[in-house]
């Protein structure tokens, strides 16, 4: 590597994103969970319909990811209903 080709230092952007999501979840509670789970579900649903069967998500199989996100959305919706009753 020459002096003109300096490697850029690692940018931990993901950690900032995770912290922001955690902050929103803390402030908005189950509403944030419902929103993020719904958004993720819609994104994976669209990707699966386009042919994606394997994901970079830890669960790998998009069917498992859809099930997980759907379960999160149901839990969030139940928490919202429970808080209103």
Image: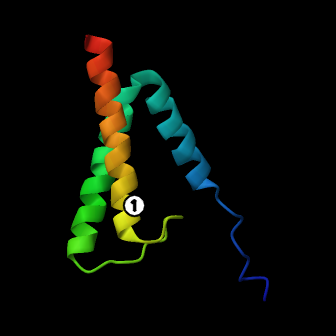
Q: Residue 33: x and y, percent?
A: 38, 36
69 left or right of 18? left
Q: Quadrant of the N terminus?
A: bottom right
Image quarter (top left, top right, bottom left or bottom right) of the C terminus: top left
Question: From the viewer's perspective, is residue 8 above or below residue 79?
Answer: below
Colour style of the rendered protein structure: rainbow
The residue pinned by badge 1 equals: 65
Q: Is residue 75 left or right of residue 85?
A: right
User: What residue appears at the point 29 percent right and 49 percent down from the top-left corner?
Assistant: 39
**Does any portion of residue 71 appear in the rendered image?**
yes
Query: In percent of the image, x 39 and y 24: which residue is there?
Result: 28
Q: How many marks?
A: 1
Quadrant of the rendered structure where residue 65 is? Answer: bottom left
Quick one: label 1, few (<14), some, or many (20+) residues within 10 Å?
many
Which residue is more in the foreground, 25 or 74? 74
Rendering coords of residue 37 (x, y %): 34, 45
Residue at the far top: name it.
85
Q: Position of residue 21 (x, y in %)?
A: 48, 39
Residue farthest toward the bottom in the current orientation of the protein: 1
Please tell me whether mark 1 sits on a helix, a strand or a loop.
helix
Q: Is residue 15 left or right of residue 76?
A: right
Say if residue 36 shows up in the picture. Answer: no
> Which quadrant of the figure has residue 13?
bottom right
Q: Position of residue 46 (x, y in %)?
A: 22, 66
The residue at 31%/17% (across/down) is: 82
Residue 42 vertical placement versus 46 (above, below): above
Q: Quadrant of residue 9?
A: bottom right
């Amino acid at each position: 590597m020459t002096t003109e080709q300096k490697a850029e230092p690692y940018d931990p952007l993901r950690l900032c994103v995770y912290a922001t999501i955690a902050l929103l979840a803390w402030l908005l509670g189950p509403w944030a969970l419902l929103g993020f789970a719904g958004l993720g579900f819609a994104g994976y649903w669209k990707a699966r319909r386009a042919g994606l069967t394997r994901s970079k998500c830890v669960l790998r199989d998009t069917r498992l990811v859809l099930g997980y996100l759907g379960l999160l959305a149901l839990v969030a919706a139940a928490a919202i209903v429970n808080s209103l009753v």
